[in-house]
Image (cartoon, rainbow, N blue to C red):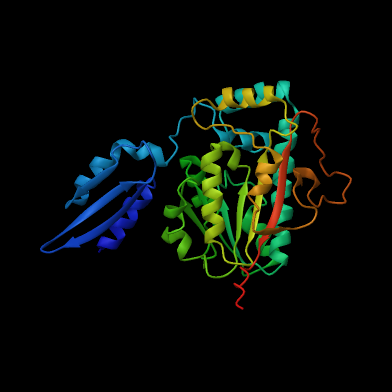
Amino acid sequence: MPTLSDDLTVLRAEFPAYKIWQEHTPGRARYVARSLRDGLNPHTVVTSDLAELRNALEPARSTGMLAFTPDQPNIARMYDYWLQGKDHYSADRAAADEITEKFPEVAQIAQANRAFLVRAVRHVARQGITQFLDLGSGLPTSPNTHEVACEAAPDARVCYVDNDPVVLAHARALLAIDGKVSVATGDIRDPATFLTDPALTHLIDPATPVCVLLVSVLHFLTAAEADAAVAAIRHWMAPGSYLVISAGTSTGTDPELVRCLRAAYGDTAPVTGRTADEIAAWFDGFSLARPGLVDVWAWRPSDSPRTLRPDVSRARFLAGVGRKLPVAPEWQP
């Protein structure tokens, strides 16, 4: 029989843009939902009835989770198309082709970015890390994070987090294959919610080192949202944890490409190019692994002659892997 805890867990998963809890006062109990984002309505709902709470929050449902429509280009599906995957629609292909007709290097960078993820996960797993949190994971693409991690660390555990319903459906069907892999609904802009999701907490122990991946996702947030999300996640990570980031940069990128991407994605997401210095600041308090923050293809590239080296004269994507340093104890005289 479902319990109250189960009901609240379901509600929190359905409405990740809200903090939802039960509070007790003398003689009664009531439920409270409070918005985690400025401008989201309703801001606060207080009721003694769970069904009434759900109905009140229903208008805000799409805010926490991307709406599904095959007629509008989608970030994850366009990326899948550039990776030569199969999970995309005609609108995605048309928008992606319009971009690569002017900037063919975009597809090359997408492929180089995926190759970076594989190399970074393998490197971190070889350092003895067995917990991985893949934020904004996108559509499953082999080799997936858990496949790479388990090659180097058979006991590795991986939680995938996304807010795209298509991504979540595919991930739950293909990735959540055993007790070492889970999939959580979550918005990167709302760390407080996904970091307490049971799908994550039953698998990931924040008291011990974890690898957090933010690969090709932060440039789809506003500058303030990206900085706040990274700061919250860095604070949550235990010393010795690893942070893996790749992101588009305005440093050296043709502004026309940014305009093309913004036009393609429309209202689904902003496209924010950060300077190289701003991206480097996301690693404050972390020790960068060699060779530091570099073009995505240049992070420990394979010696294979087939290593992809995109043309970076008009489009640049930076990548780095950092290890969180222990906090130095305060000096006492």
Asked whether, in this view, residue 22 is left or right of residue 85, the answer is left
Where residue 111 sits in the image (x, y, percent)? 72, 40
Residue 252, quarter of picture: top right
* Residue 7 image position (x, y, % from top left): 28, 56
Q: Quadrant of the N terminus?
A: bottom left
Q: Can residue 322 be seen in this snapshot?
A: yes
Q: In this view, does 138 lie above or below 258?
A: below
* Residue 160 in view in this figure: no
The residue nearer to you, when weighing 30 against 226, is: 226
Is residue 25 shown left or right of residue 103?
A: left
Quadrant housing residue 112: top right
Q: Position of residue 277 (x, y in %)?
A: 69, 43
Between 159 and 191, the residue placed more toward the observer is 191
Q: Which of 85/35 is in front?
A: 35
Residue located at (58% from left, 32% from top):
271
Q: Quadrant of the C terminus?
A: bottom right
Q: Residue furthest left?
A: 27
Question: Furthest residue to the bottom?
Answer: 333
Image position of 69 (left or right of 284): left
Vertical order, 172 against 210 (above or below): above
- Where is residue 249? Give x, y as percent: 69, 36
